[in-house]
Image (tube, grey):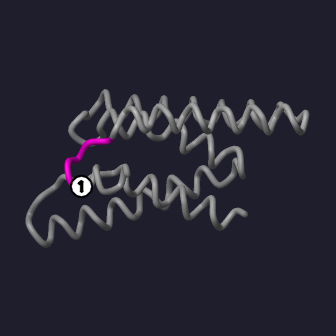
Amino acid sequence: MQVPLDLRTHRLSRGATTWAAIAVAIVVAVDAWASRAFAPAAASVMSAVVVVGVYGFLHRVSPQSLGWGDVLLVAPLTLAVANVAIQRVLWWQLAAATSGAVHAAWVRARSGGSLVPFGPHLLVAAWLILVTSL
């Protein structure tokens, strides 16, 4: 739902992002409680706080470059990726940034535009990291 919406309108659904964050937080909490391993869950939450903080800062510095929807979207995605394999958060960010940069270069070369939606890059890269981590 989010990828086609962001590609078409350059906007993300806050409702869908909020529900995703709630769902992922519940899964992380239940997993931590069931396994009695709270340190990995706390590390996942801290990772999400750091990534959201960095994205929030980047949005504040240049709102035209990174939208608020992207800032909100990284919360559930970071929590999910970090909970599966915390070291993969950096790989996810690298994959999203690289694919976004390639997409932006392609758009600029094709039409001279400079704006590309970043949400699809975050979502697809997170999905690929999660699938390859299983």
Residue nearest the observer in this picture, 7 or 104? 7
Q: Judge whether residue 128 is colored magenta.
A: no
**Figure disc tally:** 1
Which residue sits at x=65%, y=67%?
132
Query: What percent of the width, then of the height, locates residue 73?
Result: 44, 40
Q: Which residue is mark 1?
A: 116
Q: Judge whether residue 9 is colored magenta.
A: yes
**Could you say which quadrant of the image residue 99 lies in?**
bottom left
User: Is 63 on the left or on the right of 56, as rendered?
Assistant: left
Q: Quadrant of the C terminus?
A: bottom right
**Could you say which quadrant of the image residue 8 lies in?**
bottom left
Query: What percent of the width, then of the height, locates residue 18?
Result: 47, 31
In the image, the segment drawn in magenta is 8-12
Q: Is residue 127 above or below residue 9?
A: below
User: Is 32 on the left or on the right of 132, as rendered?
Assistant: right
Query: What percent of the width, then of the height, locates residue 9?
Result: 20, 48
The residue type indicated by label 1 comes to Val
